[in-house]
Image (cartoon, rainbow, N blue to C red):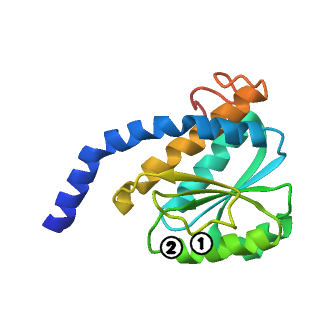
Amino acid sequence: MDPLLKAELLQGLRELPAHLERLNALEPKIIQWAHRWQDATDFLYLGRGPCYPIALEGALKLKEISYIHAEGYPAGEMKHGPIALIDKTLPVVALMPRDAHRDKTLSNLQEAAARDGRILALVTEGDTGLSGIAEDVLELPAVHPWLTPIVYAVPLQLLAYHIAVLRGCDVDQPRNLAKSVTVE
């Protein structure tokens, strides 16, 4: 591994606990989102690059504990199916850090907004490029790109948790899910 990259990653890992701690201050806003969206019947999560698996995880967590249908989808492929579902009732959760994928994801969000999609965006602190597009924006700490998925996963899990609690779901024992996997 390149020594400079290694040093950047080590420094990023040292700073990560402080960044995660700062996310606690965002929980009241996440709770507001949960109140606003607890009655939604569907969610669409969009991400690109390293945020695509986190979009999948956010959708999975929402399904598992709140029983709301949710799909994670690569933002670049939104035109091949999910775009037909976008309307004024569909929350579109967009993971949009300031990285090499940002501008293309912004283009996808503009298309979703043009179809009356309700955009909830997770962005890097200081990114003001979504005004007029996103209904709600949550600014997250800037971290090394390889660490972005860790930071972006936390608010998605909190959103799923708070929506589930508001809906009266048992978050400790979701229906039809085992605490451990015992079958192969």
Location of the N terminus (image quadrant): bottom left
Location of the C terminus (image quadrant): top right
Residue visible at 75% across and 69% down in the picture: 112
Name the amino acid type tagged 2. Answer: His
Q: Which residue is mark 2?
A: 101
Give the number of the disc on residue 105.
1
Please give left or right for residue 126 compared with residue 5 in the image: right
Query: Looking at the image, is 113 positioned above or below residue 150?
Result: below
Name the amino acid type tagged 1. Answer: Thr
Q: Nearer the viewer, residue 94 or 131?
A: 131
Few, some or many residues within 10 Å of mark 1 (<14, 14–19, 20+): many
Q: Nearer the viewer, residue 28 or 19?
A: 28
SS at circle 2: loop
Does the CB distance between marks 1 and 2 fall below 8 Å? yes
Please give left or right for residue 3 compared with residue 80 in the image: left
Query: Looking at the image, is 21 positioned above or below residue 149?
Result: above
* x and y, in percent, of residue 56 in the image: 61, 54
Cα–Cα gap, marks 1 and 2: 6 Å
SS at circle 1: helix
Residue visible at 13% across and 65% down in the picture: 3
Residue visible at 84% across and 40% down in the picture: 39
* x and y, in percent, of residue 139 in the image: 51, 53
Please give left or right for residue 131 compared with residue 154 in the image: right
* x and y, in percent, of residue 151 in the image: 44, 48
* Residue most extreme to the left: 3
